[in-house]
Each structure stands twice: as structure tokens, then as C-alpha cells.
Image (cartoon, rainbow, N blue to C red):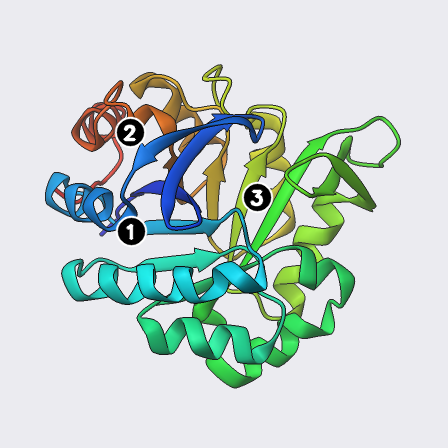
Amino acid sequence: MAVAIRVIPCLDVDNGRVVKGVNFTGLKDAGDPVELAARYDREGADELTFLDVSASVAGRGTMLDVVRRTAEQVFIPLTVGGGVRSVDDVDQLLRAGADKVSINTSAIARPELLRELAARFGSQCIVLSVDARRAQGQPSGFEVTTHGGSKSAGIDAIDWARRGAELGAGEILLNSMDGDGTKAGFDLELIAKVRDAVTIPIIASGGAGRPDHFPPAINAGADAVLAASIFHFGEVTIEDVKTSLAQAGYEVRR
């Protein structure tokens, strides 16, 4: 039996509120994260992702509280990322109720962190978040970025995805920084290149605007699809996406 495609709303959380902008700028308030999470659970989301966009030490307690309150109400898997720098950070998030933790900048700074986390918690808990954009200076044509896509990390995105998988990441959250918030569709070339490089699941992110944008991402090699603003502001529903995927011949959970 085919593995069902996962549809995942992403909630960018800033000091306890959900926000959304274009290319991580011009952030607008999109509601209470726990209320939104409960709504998505009712509407058939397969998983949820929370990204702490303030990601400061001061905001850590707020985020742990959001995770705890969400885990009490929502029974689908919850991935939390943003500002995760250590084994202790991951431990705190998992104890608060997260099922998986997403790692980004800290893994670029010290790749061995991925190996340590996988050894301690299991690869199934560790998601490598790769913020990639097109760049002529890299062999694959894609580079890794940090700071919401504003800074180049100076490394090839496909090589980094491959290395992350080798170090123990159990999944890759692949964000197209060129596509983020544009609603112009997923970067299919980026997805296909990462698919060729790794065997672990890929979550496609960045660019979703319509239900018909989602099946091509799966066809390109993604195992799951993620979106934010189109869900938060009611432009597209979880059911719309699942219907589009089912009509394209993909297995979905109803």
C-alpha cells in the first residue's frame, strides 16, 4: 500500500502569536497558535510545524508554553524549530510535547550536532531544515541561506542535504527561499535535486498558492507538502489540497 502524502500547515510563531509575511518580511498577525493548531487538527492536517521566528532566549519560555498547550489539545505529530542550538534545547521541546525538532543554523555552524541529536533521541525526531535559494556560485545551482534567507551560508544546498542525512537527520524540511510567500508554486527543480541526493523523506516548503501546486511537488520527489499563509487566511483548505492530491492519484488520509 502506498504511503499517504502528508499535508502540513506551518505556523511561524513570534512571541506567542502566529505571523506571516513574504520572504520573511512585513509580518502580519495570523492568530493564536494553539487555536490555529486545533483548527487544523479538526480540518484533517496530518502534522503541524511550529517555527519560532523570534527564537531568542527570552522567547524560549513562551514557545515551550505554546508547545505544551498545543500538545494537550492536538493529537497529530508536532514539529518545532527555530533557535534550537543544543541537546538540551531539543530535550526541553520533546518533554514539552513536540514529536520532532527542526534544526537549521546550529547544524550549519556545527554539523556534528546532528549526529549527537540522532544518537540521543533517534533520527525519527530530528528534522534538518534547509533554507535554499538559487545561486550561480554553487555546483548544484542552489545555496544554503540563514537568517530567514538573508545571508548566504556559502555551501551547496544539495551537498548539505546529503551530508545532513548521512549525519543522522531523519527528514529534510526543504524551504525554497525564492518561493517563500510568493504563491507561485514549489521549486520543482530544487525538490528533484534533493530527492536524487537523499533517501530520507522530504517536506516541500515555499511557494504554495493553489491546490494544483501540490501534486507536482510530490511528483518531483517530496513525501509531504507544507504551507502557511494560504491556510491561515482561508485561501486554500487542507481538504482542497488533499482532493487535488487524490485526483492526481496520490494516497491521502481523509
Residue visible at 52% across and 46% down?
53
Mark 2 element type: helix
Q: Which residue is painted at 82% across and 46% down in the image?
A: 155
Q: Nearer the viewer, residue 150 or 187?
A: 150
Residue 154: % across, % down: 85, 44
- Give the residue pinned by disc 1: 47
Please name the residue that numbered disc 2 is placed on: 231
Please say whether residue 185 is visible from this viewpoint: yes
Q: Is residue 152 above or below residue 81?
A: above
Counting residues from the N terminus, which is met first, the one under dot 3 or under dot 1?
Answer: 1
In the picture, the disc for residue 251 is none
Depth order, front residue of 248/134: 134
Instruction: Left or right? Give the position of 209 relative to 152.
Output: left
Q: Quote the CA–CA distance across marks 3 and 1.
A: 21 Å
Residue 129: percent from the left, percent from the top?
57, 51
Q: Cα distance, mark 1 to mark 2? A: 14 Å
Closer to us: mark 3 or mark 1? 1
Q: Nearer the viewer, mark 1 or mark 2?
A: 2
Report if the CB atoms under discs 1 and 2 are less than 8 Å apart: no
Q: Residue 93: name its quadrant.
A: bottom left
Which three-letter amino acid code belongs to the residue tagged 1?
Answer: Glu
Q: Residue placed farthest to the front in the image?
A: 58
SS at mark 3 in the image = helix
- Amino acid at pointer 2: Phe
Q: Earlier in the sequence, mark 2 or mark 3?
A: 3
Circle 2 residues within 10 Å: few <14, some 14–19, many ≥20: some
